[in-house]
Image (cartoon, rainbow, N blue to C red):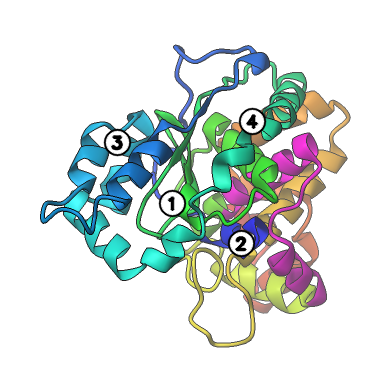
Amino acid sequence: MKLKLIILFVLISIQNTSFAQNNFSDNPLDAVFETKDSKNFWEAFDKMDKTKQNPFVEYMQKGSPGVKAFTENRIINADSLFAVVKKRKADYELSRNVLEGISSKAKRVRAIYSALKYWYPNAKFPPIYFVYGRFNSGGTSAPEGIIIGTEKLTNLDGISGLIAHELVHYQQNIIGKDMLLKWCLLEGGADFIGELTSGESINQDSYKYGEQNIDKLCTEFIARLKNPDHQDWLYGTSKKDDRPNDLGYWIGYKIIESYFNKQKDKQKAIQEILNIKDPLQFLKESGFLNTYIEKYQKSKKKSFDDFFK
């Protein structure tokens, strides 16, 4: 499976969307790739048939800050990890040597970091941890840094785009009421700025479907966007139709793109996109859904401006 498909499983589950820490470098050339957890994992893996004990206890104890951050809601504990590894040994084996070429990606990632520094001078650059979990997350951003679920990698195709996406999440500070719109702007913003800095698009299936069904989806979205329920837009679908996962990434991208294109000062626009204070007002200023909102409000016999209250 290529990484561009794996990205569909990336979850952002932390409600506080601001991760930046003052102790991390503001120099893009300081990007750090931490791979020791992979070595520790395979040492534990190779002991499974030689001991009656759980070898992943040591993996957890020796774990980097990335492992510790990945534990809550993902790894859970050594016993949970052991159970999944025993059941899916062959799947884990597919990633055994995947990090052998990671050093070749370092220059590319530093170039992406430098591009973000240009667009957002306040950017911070956390370490990137390659850890092993339970096949339930391809990656995330946490106060400890960017964390990649290495078991989901069978090659490094698209790893730069994935890191760019997670790096943007690390910079974001999007506040406001919990609603679908907010989380679509979070994900769409990470895709938009990640693509701007890396040149890579990582959610091609959902974007293609979105463009092919834009009228239907925009009409549906405006009726749903104030609801906190993510179903059918982010992190899974109800299978009610043929839509792919994570269409919220696509529509969030479209809103962000529309806003960006309307601004004269593009660097200021990036700062505003990363620090959205009022998602509904941002949507209004983007203009992307205005036609659909006008039609929706007319059917409700309400004014256009009332929609954004």
Report if the CB atoms under discs 2 and 1 are less than 8 Å apart.
Answer: no
Disc on the earlier residue, 4 or 2:
4
Q: Is residue 226 left or right of residue 260?
A: left
Q: Amino acid at mark 4?
A: Ser
Disc on the earlier residue, 3 or 2:
3
Q: Tell me the residue at 63%/12% (across/down).
A: 27
Dominant secondary structure (helix, strand or loop) of the stretch shown in magenta: helix
For the residue labelled by badge 2, is the local secondary structure a helix, a strand or a loop? helix
Marks 3, 4: nearer the viewer:
4
Instruction: Give the x, y percent position of residue 59.
Output: 26, 40
Disc on the earlier residue, 2 or 1:
1
Towards the viewer: 287 or 152: 152
Instruction: Give the x, y percent position of residue 57.
Output: 18, 43
Q: Quadrant of residue 32?
A: top right
Q: Which residue is mark 1?
A: 178
Report if the CB atoms under discs 4 and 1 are less than 8 Å apart.
Answer: no
Q: Residue furthest left?
A: 52
Specify start and end residues of the magenta stretch as a single range: 184-212
Towards the viewer: 217 or 89: 89
Q: Of the numbered discs in the image, which one, if any, rests on residue 68?
A: 3
Q: Tell me the residue at 40%/50% (across/down).
A: 13
Instruction: Give the x, y percent position of residue 199.
Output: 81, 42
Q: Of the numbered discs in the image, which one, if any, rests on residue 248?
A: 2
Disc on the earlier residue, 3 or 4:
3
Q: Quadrant of residue 88?
A: bottom left
Above/below status of 109 relative to 219:
above
Quadrant for the N terminus in the image: bottom right
Above/below status of 78 relative to 170:
below
Residue 298 in sight from this viewpoint: no
Disc on the earlier residue, 1 or 3:
3
Q: How many marks?
A: 4
